[in-house]
């Protein structure tokens, strides 16, 4: 995979990871969407609408937590498709959101990055569970992370620039010392606007967007092992 650079950055001291799709595999829910909707592609329709409406909430000054919004968007997609949605279906999807597994490359990639001295943190749209646990806790990845931040603490969604600025401040560094790692370029745009460098992980259904007027990722990698290699691990 080619490495694309807008500029050659100094080595970041902290890698701040997105969680959903970047580290955890949302495609694990595809069989349930096929069962409910008769179409695996309904997963992507739902997820894209979820991201769209989270951004709309922040831009308009409103907030509902990500899991509440996810359930409402699921009902909206069912209504659009004229598909009956039972309470059991809704509960099943909620449970699967909370239990998404890690991509196979994630643990070895994080291990390589950690062993080469990178500090590692997470910034996710998802709120913590009622018991205080996170999706990374449930996926067995929490030990790699110095801090886990949820936008629920700010009540605004990514890519609001202030989230990235405040995350760097909480970590005790300047934004320029942070690299945002995400499968979504819209996430990286917000981080770069705050002064971060960035790495795009091209998970399935994700690809670089190059357009004049928008920042381009500092690095592009197929997975975390490749990213670790690009960062000298």
Image: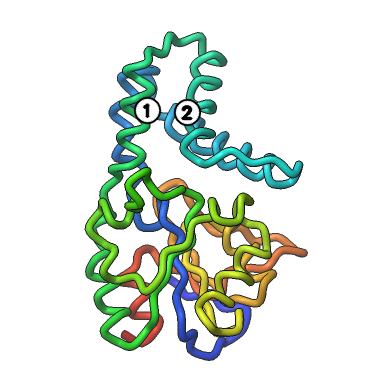
Viewed as shown, does residue 77 lie left or right of 138? right
Mark 1–mark 2 Cα distance, whole angstroms, equals 17 Å
Q: Residue at x 31, y 36 (%)?
A: 96
Kindly identify the residue that appears in the image at 71 percent across and 63 percent down.
214
Give me the disc on residue 40.
1
12 lies left or right of 217: left
Question: Which numbered disc, 1 or 2, marks the residue that appears first in the sequence?
Answer: 1
Q: Quadrant of residue 93?
A: top left
Q: Residue 57's spot in the image, x, y percent?
A: 68, 40
Q: Is residue 213 left or right of residue 173?
A: right
Q: Report helix, strand or loop for mark 1.
A: loop
Q: Which residue is mark 2?
A: 71
Depth check: give the residue in front, 10 or 69. Answer: 69
| Vertical relation: 32 (above or below) 177 | above
Give the class, few, some or many, for how many residues have Cα within 10 Å of label 2's Cα (few <14, many ≥20).
Answer: some
Q: Residue 228 sits in which quadrant?
A: bottom left
Residue at 28% of width from left, 56% of height from top?
137
- Image coordinates of residue 211 in percent, x first then y, are 70, 60
* Rendered-image quadrant of the N terminus: bottom left
Few, some or many residues within 10 Å of mark 1 (<14, 14–19, 20+) = some
Q: Is 95 drawn above or below residue 228 in the view shown?
A: above
Q: Is residue 94 above or below residue 122?
A: above
């Amino acid at each position: 995979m080619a490495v694309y650079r807008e500029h050659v950055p100094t080595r970041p001291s902290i890698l701040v990871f997105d969680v959903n799709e970047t580290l955890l595999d949302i495609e694990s829910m595809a069989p349930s969407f096929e069962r409910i909707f008769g179409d695996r592609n309904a997963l992507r329709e739902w997820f894209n609408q979820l991201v769209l409406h989270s951004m709309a909430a922040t831009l308009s000054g409103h907030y509902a937590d990500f899991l509440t919004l996810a359930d409402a968007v699921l009902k909206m997609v069912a209504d659009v498709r004229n598909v009956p949605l039972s309470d059991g279906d809704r509960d099943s999807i909620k449970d699967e959101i909370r239990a998404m597994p890690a991509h196979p490359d994630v643990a070895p990639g994080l291990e390589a990055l950690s062993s080469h001295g990178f500090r590692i943190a997470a910034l996710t749209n998802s709120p913590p569970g009622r018991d205080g646990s996170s999706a990374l806790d449930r996926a067995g990845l929490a030990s790699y992370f110095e801090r886990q931040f949820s936008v629920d603490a700010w009540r605004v969604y990514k890519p609001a620039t202030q989230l990235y600025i405040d995350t760097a401040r909480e970590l005790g560094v300047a934004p320029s010392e942070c690299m945002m790692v995400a499968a979504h370029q819209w996430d990286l745009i917000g981080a770069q606007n705050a002064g971060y460098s960035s790495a795009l992980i091209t998970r399935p259904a994700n690809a670089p967007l190059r357009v004049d007027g928008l920042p381009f990722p500092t690095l592009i990698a197929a997975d975390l092992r490749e990213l670790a290699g690009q960062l000298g691990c």
